[in-house]
Image (cartoon, rainbow, N blue to C red):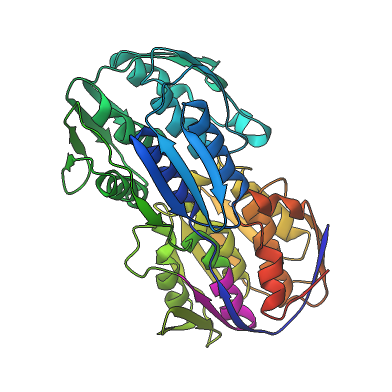
Amino acid sequence: MKLVHPSAIKGRVAAPHSKSVFQRAAAAACLARGASVLRASDLCADDRAALRAAAALGAGVEEVPGAVRIRGGGEAPGGTIDCGESGLCLRLFAALAALSGAEYLLRASGSLLSRPVGMLSGPLAALGASCRSRNGFPPLTVRGPLRGGNIELDGSVTSQFLTGLLLALPLCPEDSQIRVRELKSRPYVELTLETVRAFGGRIEAERDLSLLRIGGSQRYRPREMEIEGDWSAAAFLLVAGALAGEAEVSGLAEDSRQADRSVLAALGAAGAVWDRGPGFIRARGGNLRPFRFDAADCPDLFPPLAALALGCPGASEIAGAHRLRHKESDRAAALREEFAKLGGRIEVNGDIMTVNGGRLSGGKASARGDHRIAMALALGALTARGPVEIEGDESVAKSYPGFFRDLEKLGSGVR
């Protein structure tokens, strides 16, 4: 349990590496014949789930100081893949496991047990593999081999399974074509395509990503890669600066494909001031105002933006709330109910989250086992009238183990 005190902050911290980039790179590396080196440190729980999955698929995995070495191209023996609570790991590595003729059981824990995977069965069957789930939920059993082919996918719920197929299908013996309906997470798919190219794969994509053509019988090449900083994590630090002083975050790629880079647009809409320095992004408070922002393509921004909106006078609106139901918690309900315990007013009507700004009172709230809810509550505490006690703070280990340490580096009172 963490107690976060109202605090003025100022300082610089380095963004942790992107788990979205790391997991995609680990998947490609386990399929490449030879040794790849992914330079990243302070691995989070989702990173380790991807490494377990790579090892289960026959890759050699070795952690060295500041990096992970993955020797791919090994024979997939079948067995169990422990995905922990990582939805990306489960949906991505289901497609990779189906490349093998061996049977794999993909296990989940915690909130991932209630996240849907039923959308995997039909496409995998059409591509030559079999897939069984627990009435549409984990655990998941897959057996290949995938051969390739033509399929249609619904992209309105998640793009994570599409990511897995885009990494797996280039290695199938036949060419493939994927038509995608209602894609809601385009930046994440672009990130996947960038990873495929980085490891030597080729995919032709329509500009709107509604049609993807994948040649079969390709090979990935091993490579060394510096894993870029995580905009999803950095969003919390930059919002902290906008609310309570000033924060500089280093290690971020401004040309990143990561969806959550759009936090900068949200900060601007809210009247916060941000600028670039040599190797860092700085955010600080300005004349904060209510804002409107569409987070349908970047739903992980809802928690930090809700905290930002609570610090803005008037009513702010964040669109895309339908994307929040199947996360580590029902995030719309979690944000509304947990901030209410601290005196905040958040309403959700259809696809719109309305946040009524006003100073929080402080008090006690629960992260509900959700790393991003824990971090959002900590942001709310920075400008509250009294300290905020966060139950379940350990959940930040899923994506950002050093979050509270870094918040303290910026000057927040955390104990």
Q: For this rendering, which residue is in front, 15 or 111?
A: 15
Compared to residue 163, the image places residue 354 above or below, namely below
Left or right: residue 188 versus residue 3 is: left
Compared to residue 325, the image places residue 75 above or below, namely above
Where is residue 189, by image quadrant?
A: top left
At which x and y percent is residue 224?
37, 53
Q: For this rendering, which residue is in front, 334 or 260?
A: 260
Residue at x-position 62% and y-position 75%: 311
Where is residue 242, by image quadrant?
A: bottom right
Compared to residue 351, the image places residue 302 above or below, namely below
Where is residue 341, by image quadrant?
A: bottom right
Residue at x-position 23% and y-position 30%: 178
Residue at x-position 21% and y-position 31%: 218
Q: For this rendering, which residue is in front, 236 or 267?
A: 236
Q: How many marks?
A: 0
At which x and y percent is residue 350?
50, 47
Instruction: State the quadrant of the C terminus.
Output: bottom right
Span shown in magenta: 237-251
Q: Is residue 345 visible?
A: no
Compared to residue 362, the image places residue 146 above or below, namely above
At which x and y percent is residue 108?
61, 29
Q: Is residue 287 visible?
A: yes
At which x and y percent is residue 114?
61, 30
Left or right: residue 12 versus residue 25 is: right
Left or right: residue 95 versus residue 141 is: left
Q: For this rendering, which residue is in front, 202 or 373?
A: 202
* Residue 248 lies in the magenta-colored region: yes
Residue at x-position 48% and y-position 61%: 230
